Image (spheres, rainbow, N blue to C red):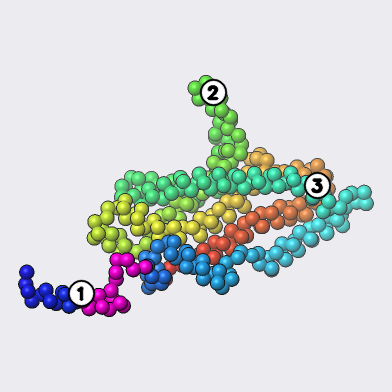
Amino acid sequence: MNPDRRPARACSSAQHDHNPAVALRWNAPLPDTTDMPVLLPMAARVSGDAAAERRAGTWTLRLGPAHGLALLLVFVVGCGVAQAQAGAGNPSVLATIWKWTPLLLRGFVFNLAISVVAMGAGTLAGMMLGFAQISLLPPVRGGARFVTQFFRNAPWLVLLFYCMFLLPFQVTILGVTIPIPDWLKATLGLALPVMANVSEIVRGAVQSIPTAQWESSASLAFNRRQTMWMIILPQCIKRMLPPWMNLYAILTMSTVLASIVGVDEMMSLTRQALSAENRPGLLLAFYSYVLLWFFVYCYPIARWTVRLEARYAVNQ
């Protein structure tokens, strides 16, 4: 060993050890801020941002007054029009809506169940399809892109009709007949476009990560699987979560399409209630009531999506 270099390294090491601004000790706590926020652990970023929001008092989700007043105005106008057209012997509009509320809420819960099942199935299939889109094998990549673009650009109602009329009403496995209900077919029809959109979300999130991180991982002897699971995907979560939540809100509002193919959800039950009442003036009031329930459920999701986009924004 060259003795002339040893003092230089020792001096350099000593300077780093005595300079707290330069030294990086193995047991030093992780910094709360950095010029490269994507390198901070997810828990540290989330906890720090959440604490800042709690101190500022801005973490609570609230419906905007203007949105609530506009929705209330639509409902009041609908009730007023229906009451003006009602006869002398008919009950009030609010009493009629309240009478049918338990049935309508049962249909609304069914809408939410369809949206949750369709979103779960579409997310699992879409993640696998999205990873296939970034595969190194050209046949796998090309096939995944074709499936994604086909279902992503197909009308949702057309996919619902295909699933309703192409799938059998029952299947027989080992002598056991298993019926396939209409709601399951509708769920599958809604899961197909969700799968395609989630596939694009995964592909876009992965490809949005700078290529320098792939190169740095390769220089540290990480293989492709280790780089994907340990470095790339943790950063993609914050990029995928807002569009995923936005897609779920769109899916929830689209579950009313299942009423066209005969599923007894909230819209179908609303039509049944209107037919039973046989009062055309109730049309606007009842559908405004349906709008109210979907708005109350989907609007906080949309607001939360905006907050997540602001929280996980990364300045590159």
- Identify the mark nearer the N-term, 2 or 3: 3
In front here: 315 or 186?
A: 315
Q: Main secondary structure of the magenta part?
A: loop
Please name the residue that numbered disc 1 is placed on. 13
* SS class, disc 2: strand
The magenta stretch is: 13-29
* Residue kind at label 1, given as amino acid type: Ser
Looking at the image, which residue is at 39% across and 65% down? 40
In front here: 60 or 120?
A: 60
Residue 79, percent across and down?
A: 81, 57
Looking at the image, which residue is at 82% across and 53% down? 94
Residue 57, percent across and down?
A: 59, 71
Whether pointer 3 and pointer 1 mark residues with C-beta atoms closer than 8 Å, the reply is no
Please name the residue that numbered disc 2 is placed on. 176
Q: Mark 1 against mark 2, which lies toward the viewer?
A: 1
Dot 3 crowding, Cα within 10 Å, few <14, some 14–19, many 20+: few
Looking at the image, which residue is at 37% across and 48% down? 132
Question: Relative to 66, is 124 on the left or the right?
Answer: left
Q: How far apart are the alpha carbons under marks 1 and 2?
A: 75 Å
Dot 2 crowding, Cα within 10 Å, few <14, some 14–19, many 20+: few
Residue 213, percent across and down?
A: 31, 62
* Residue kind at label 3, given as amino acid type: Lys
Determine if the magenta segment contains residue 24: yes
Please name the residue that numbered disc 3 is placed on. 99
Q: Quadrant of residue 216?
A: bottom left
Residue 9, percent across and down?
A: 15, 74
* SS class, disc 1: helix
